[in-house]
Image (cartoon, rainbow, N blue to C red):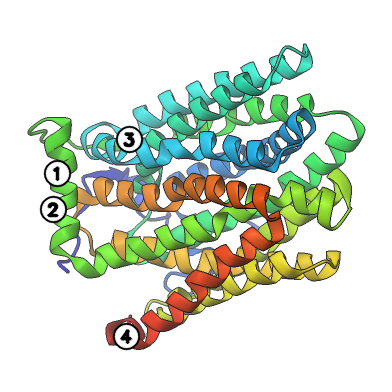
Amino acid sequence: MEPAKPTAAVASPEAAAPPAGQPLAPGLPARLFAPGTGMLRALRLRDYRLFWTGNFLSNIGTWMHHVALGWLVLEMTNSPFLLGLVGFAQFIPALLFSLPGGVIADRVNRRAWLLVTHSVMLLLALALALGVSFNVMNFAAVAAIAFLLGTTSAVNFPAFQAMVRDLSSREDLLNAIALNSMQFNASRFIGPAVAGILVGTVGLAICFYINAASYLAPLVALWMVHYRAEARPVSGSLGVGLQEGFDYLRGHPRIFLLVGFVGMISLFGLPYLIFLPVFARDVLHVGATGLGYMFSASGGGALAGAMVLAGWRPEWRRVPLVLGGMLFFFGGVLTLALSTNFYLSLAALAVVGAAMVAAVATINSLLQTVVPDEVRGRVLGWHSMAYLGFSPIGSLLIGLVADVWNTPAALAVSAALPLVLTIILFFKLPWLRQLQ
């Protein structure tokens, strides 16, 4: 694996280092921002701090949307299969469009592209909110909006991931990715709990309105960052760009396998999120409020995992994060599938959230560290496709099996198979045990 070359799009000199002696966050201990060791060290960079804050606020709205959407579809259809089908519609675009999104991320001004995609997502979320308010939504319309939101997110995500590195420093990259996971999962803890309360008291539409408004936060942050995009030479068609990304992965089988691990997590494990409304209503009997707590338990665990990752020092080995994360992730999903106790389910969801962050974010940091900048967007496109694109296939398959058996049994089989495969790979691939 060759070392990464200097990034082609960088933050301004102002963002590269804080003014000497100037506190970044008065009232917080300086050691939290200490270079090399501070848990919040990447936030000492102004532009990354703006980017991080904007996306944190937006993701709170996104998680409120997910809770409300699942409850809306379940009330509208009373079908686990159709619930899985909406999950399929929402995330299948990642399988179809993440790779083109990676090519776009390598060829355009990433900030300008994110401004466009976030604006489109704001309008789609507002359309869903209005449709629910005026009671003109049917299942087909909900699925269509879910598909369009997923498509926009798919072409957005590689550029978003690349911006994390563009606005941080190379030595703080793992920390920046960990902090990004922290904000994502803090929002995953806050948003569902608020949504569960609002759905049970005010109604579904308010969650969709809040999601639409939340997109203003990253739009403002993107306008405020000092971002200089250097010219990127563009050669060949979109197809040529896609082929170059695939050729790079084919020539680096270890990177390909790491992307494959992310795909395994997405295909066999991540669909648990889609089916949480079924567990809340039919297995645990805790209603919409309990569903919010279940989403929050997963988000709280993921936040804890991201905090551990943020404190992980560059010299420490990462193999426990990747392989240990995968083992605990699939083990937690299996426990959830077999549990009939609400509190055991909450504990399992917390473990699942922490383990997923440990594995997926660490793999992301490894890819961004070793992949050269001229193909970084395309490799991250593969990572995005694996992380988000395989989940809808898993959702659809589990939904089909759940209609024949039941949802807990389908999810249990889906988690047990990769759990065994992960153990086999650990013993069959020595380089995994030596991962740095």
Whole-percent x and y of residue 171?
34, 66
Q: Label 1 vs label 3: CA separation?
A: 21 Å
Q: Label 2 vs label 4: CA separation?
A: 25 Å
The kind of residue on which mark 2 rests is Asp
Label 3 crowding class (10 Å Cα cut-off): few <14, some 14-19, many 20+? many
Q: Which residue is mark 4?
A: 428
Which of pointers 2 and 4 indicates the residue nearer the eye?
4
Choose top left, top right, bottom left or bottom right for residue 279. Answer: bottom right
Q: Nearer the viewer, residue 178 or 229?
A: 178
**Label located before the other in sequence (2 or 4):** 2
**Residue at 72%, 41% in the rendered image:** 67
Q: Label 1 vs label 4: CA separation?
A: 30 Å
Q: Label 3 vs label 4: CA separation?
A: 40 Å
Q: Which mark is residue 243?
A: 1
| Relative side of 247 to 317, left or right | left
Q: Which mark is residue 247?
A: 2
**Label located before the other in sequence (1 or 4):** 1
